[in-house]
Amino acid sequence: MSESSTSPIVSGTAARSHAEAALVDMFQNGQQVAICSGAVIAPKVVLTAGHCVDGFNGWRITTPYASGQKATASGAAVFDWKSTGDTVDPSKHDVALIFLSTAIDLTKYPKLATAKQADGTLALNIGRIGSGRASFSDLFQGQQVALRDGAKVGFAFDYYSTEIIESGDSGGPVELTDGTIVAVNSGAGGGTQVLARV
């Protein structure tokens, strides 16, 4: 398994204040084949991207900033996501839930946004790419980016902003300053990133 990287979350720093931030290792038939990021949103539930779930049948979750707790899962659900290769499908919701076999206990679980954020709302991305390399022990947060309505660029279920994520950051939470999760990292390229709204 390898994960190619060309740039890190820009100006990324360790996301130590985000106990919910999770490393998501994806498996097919007992073999780890890919990595993503995610967020523990309830004792046995992890929020991530749909493309981090579809096509896989096992997951290992690690929360570096919640005492390094680990859990595994063999069950997950997507809203309507189906694998479409290496590109984000603008007609689908790239969000998913992973259901853990044992609980990951946090002092407080993050809130999820219940409404679309206004253009210009500032949020930060959390993911596992740092200094251009995939991390298996840490997650990183970027500087705040201004969210824009993805419908303006053909992604009706998403936000878009300046690109600071890359492969491996997918599924990581996009959070407001109060910790509310508004989206998950979905895809990026050409200076723009797409963030799937929760």
Image: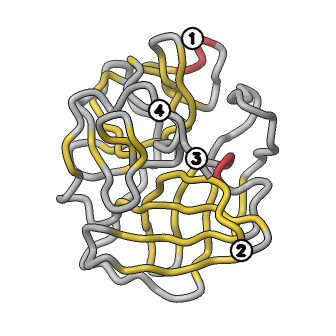
Residue 179 position, x and y percent, is: 27, 52
What is the quadrant of residue 108 in the picture? bottom left
Q: Amino acid at mark 2?
A: Gly
For label 4, the SS is loop
Residue 67 position, x and y percent, is: 26, 79
Q: CA distance from mark 4 to mark 2?
A: 29 Å
Q: CA distance from mark 4 to mark 3?
A: 10 Å
Q: CA distance from mark 3 to mark 1?
A: 34 Å
The answer to whether 195 appears left or right of 122 in the picture is right
Residue 34 position, x and y percent, is: 62, 53
How many neighbours does mark 1 have within 10 angstroms: few (below 14), some (14-19), or many (20 or more)? few
Q: Which residue is mark 3?
A: 2
Q: Which residue is mark 1?
A: 152
How many neighbours does mark 4 have within 10 angstroms: few (below 14), some (14-19), or many (20 or more)? some
In this view, the mark in front (2 or 3):
3
Q: How many numbered badges does the structure rendering display?
A: 4
Q: Amino acid at mark 4?
A: Ser
User: Which mark is on residue 5?
Assistant: 4
Q: Which residue is mark 2?
A: 75
